[in-house]
Image: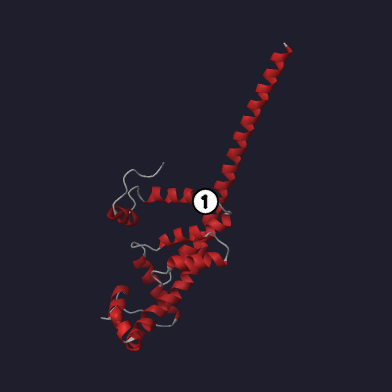
Amino acid sequence: MFKRRYKKPILHKVRDFIWPASGWNRAGKYLHFRLARIPGTSYAVAAGFACGSAVSFTPFIGLHFILAALLAWIIRANILTSAMGTAVGNPWSFPFIWTGTYQTGQFILGREPREESIVELISSTIGEIRIGQFINDFWQTADLLKPFLELVFLPMLIGGILIGIMAWFATYIPLYKMISKYKKERIIRRLKKSEKRLMTVEKMLDDSKKTNEE
């Protein structure tokens, strides 16, 4: 009943994902209310979203949904909100995430960050490797990937795990408070409505009783 009469073209969906038509502020408020209304405890909803947020800082592009769901399942959080949390990693944030995780990992490993951008590093270390090479000569291709795994992937993984842990708490704490507050206020509103209805019924019964007595 409430679905769109005409579906959005794919390009419009992609555009809205990159830059919401309603603006980021309104999109953030909508996300907050949507999270708060999802069935489940405040912990499960907030922790699930935090799992998706944390996993977004790992270099496992393409596996974020699966990893977030697995992590949410382990800590008994909401799997649906874990998928929503992966939206933290998006075309606007990935350049900053990759740069931050790489530099953090290099620092932990005691290495000097290289002057090239993270995109240049990935391009230079992977080179001209094609998917077809994995099929034709897997082991030779694996050897070619060693510089990428050592120089780029490893520091991004180490930095991503550390920043991801911090991101989990930075996301969970405020979300838990907001969702708990919303659920409490919602219960209070429902109780007030129930009280008003009860008072109305009692008044009707009293009026009916007086009328019968007369």
What type is the residue that disc 1 sits on?
Answer: Ile
Looking at the figure, which quarter contains the C terminus?
top right
Which picture quadrant has residue 92? bottom left
Q: Position of residue 69 (x, y in %)?
A: 49, 65
Q: Is residue 106 visible?
A: no
Disc 1 target residue? 38
Image check: 20 left or right of 211? left
Indicate the secondary structure of the residue bearing disc 1.
Answer: loop
Q: Position of residue 212 (x, y in %)?
A: 71, 14
Q: Is residue 58 visible?
A: yes
Image check: 211 left or right of 143? right
Looking at the figure, which quarter contains the N terminus?
top left
Question: Most extreme residue toward the top, as rendered?
Answer: 214
Question: Most extreme residue toward the right, as rendered?
Answer: 213
Q: Which is more toward the observer, 38 or 10? A: 10
Colouring mode (rainbow / by chain / secondary structure / one colour):
secondary structure
- What residue lies at 44% left-to-right and 65% top-to-bottom? 65
Sort mark 1 into few (<14), some (14-19) or many (20+) by Cα contacts within 10 Å: some
- What residue lies at 65% left-to-right and 28% top-to-bottom? 199
